[in-house]
Image: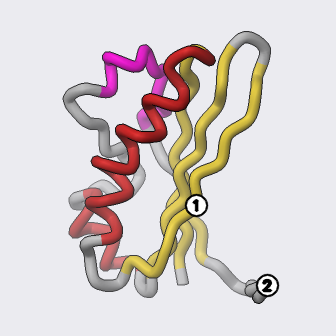
Amino acid sequence: MYHREWKCRCPKETADGFVEYLAETGIKDTQSIEGCTGYQVLKREVGDEIEITFVSFWQEFELMKEYAGDNLYKAVLYPEDHKYRIVPDTEVKVYEVIEALSAN
């Protein structure tokens, strides 16, 4: 399994709207691809901003290319991101999951 992680920062007043927009774009797009097994969206306050982290989980490394293209480490950005005044990371981190525990 693989874990793909992307982050951005945005003003507190646009954070909730951006999370809704992320659901309509990145989350919807990743979850429509066979081989994407789930996701998490995390947020935390950093000074006057909110940091949002989008993590998607993949069965195989190569399956991420259907979403990200050939450069798996380049962020996938969407046309209306700017409306939420995000400061996006332009690169993502990809990890191989070597151990995990699911709490049920």
Q: Where residue 64 sits: x, y (%)?
A: 34, 70
- Given the image, on which type of amino acid does mark 1 rest? Gln
Q: Mark 1 points at which residue?
A: 40
- Given the image, on which type of amino acid does mark 2 rest? Ala
Tell me which residue sits at (59%, 45%) in the image.
Answer: 53
| Image quadrant occupied by the C terminus | bottom right
Q: Can I make out residue 71 in this image? A: yes
Q: How far apart are marks 1 and 2 (CA)?
A: 14 Å
Please give the label number shown on residue 103.
Answer: 2
Q: Which residue is situated farthest in the top direction here? A: 48
Q: Is residue 89 magenta?
A: yes
Tell me which residue sits at (42%, 40%) in the image.
Answer: 20
Tell me which residue sits at (79%, 84%) in the image.
Answer: 103
Q: Where residue 85 sits: x, y (%)?
A: 43, 14
> What colouring method underlies this structural image?
secondary structure
Start and end of the magenta stretch? Answer: 81-90
Tell me which residue sits at (46%, 21%) in the image.
Answer: 86
Task: Check disc 2 and report its element: helix, strand or loop.
Answer: loop
Relative horizontal placement of residue 100, taking residue 30 as reference (left or right)? right
